[in-house]
Image: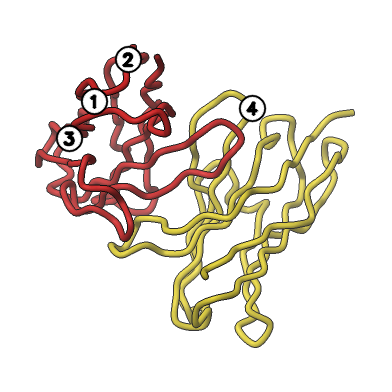
Chain colours: A red, B yellow
Amino acid sequence: EIVLTQSPATLSVSPGERATLSCRASQTVSSNLAWYQQKPGQAPRLLIYGASTRATGIPARFSGSGSGTEFTLTISSLQSEDFAVYYCQQYNNWPPGTFGPGTKVDI
Amino acid sequence: EVQLVESGGGLVKPGGSLRLSCAASGFTFSTYSMNWVRQAPGKGLEWVSYISSSSSYIHYADSVKGRFTISRDNAKKSLYLQMNSLRAEDTAVYYCARGGPHYGSFDPWGQGTLVTVSS
């Protein structure tokens, strides 16, 4: 089973700053990686799929990059509504679609 | 607007059974694959089960194989998860999620229903 590692576990940033989140896979997942955002008490929301394609309705300040085993989610200028937990998920070896442990972005 | 609404969660004793439902609206349910994904309290996400649009293909996580059964009724626009032989470690919020733009991704998700397995 492919294991995903996310770093850092917690990222403290100020509104307007840039946030960079990392996801590393234990073996290559090609570009078959997605990012999800989850706010407290809410369901996850798809942000990015195919490592770099924004899902419908996702603001341009969210961008994804990487392939193989190293991936990055960048939030160019954090808004108050962006403080949340972010999960990466691989679907190269699917099923199962394994998730990373998450990165919490807080103030 | 695409909507997924789960129901059927609750408190059940170890070894018991529960059936979850997910009502879909706002899209052509019969043309999409569907999934169940769960999240234990304070923990991360775990994919549970997948069913193709016509029920031809079904997959389960190893942790639930042989105990859980996924099904769907396209006429009723509904997804189901029959959970038997429940264990304390099955305690979680269960989300139904539509198959996303890439096979294996999930979009959107319902709001979830809490299943608590405790004596």
Which image quarter is the N terminus of chain A in? Answer: top left
**Mark 2 touching mark 1, by CB under 8 A?**
yes
Question: Can marks 4 and 2 be said to lie on one chain?
Answer: no
Question: Can marks 2 and 1 be said to lie on one chain?
Answer: yes
For the residue pair B32 and B13, the one nearer the viewer reads as B32
Q: In this view, does B42 lie to the left or right of A2?
A: right
Q: Position of residue A63 (x, y in %)?
A: 18, 41
- Report the Cα–Cα distance between label 2 and label 3: 25 Å
Q: Mark 1 points at which residue?
A: A21
Name which residue lies at 54% across and 44% down: A43
- Report the Cα–Cα distance between label 2 and label 1: 8 Å
Chain designation of label 2: A
Q: In this view, does A24 lie above or below B80?
A: above
**Callout 2: few (<14), some (14-19), or many (20+) C-alpha neighbours within 10 Å?**
some
Name the element at disc 4. Answer: loop
Q: Is residue B29 above or below residue B44?
A: below
- Report the Cα–Cα distance between label 1 and label 3: 19 Å
Q: Is residue B16 above or below residue A69?
A: below
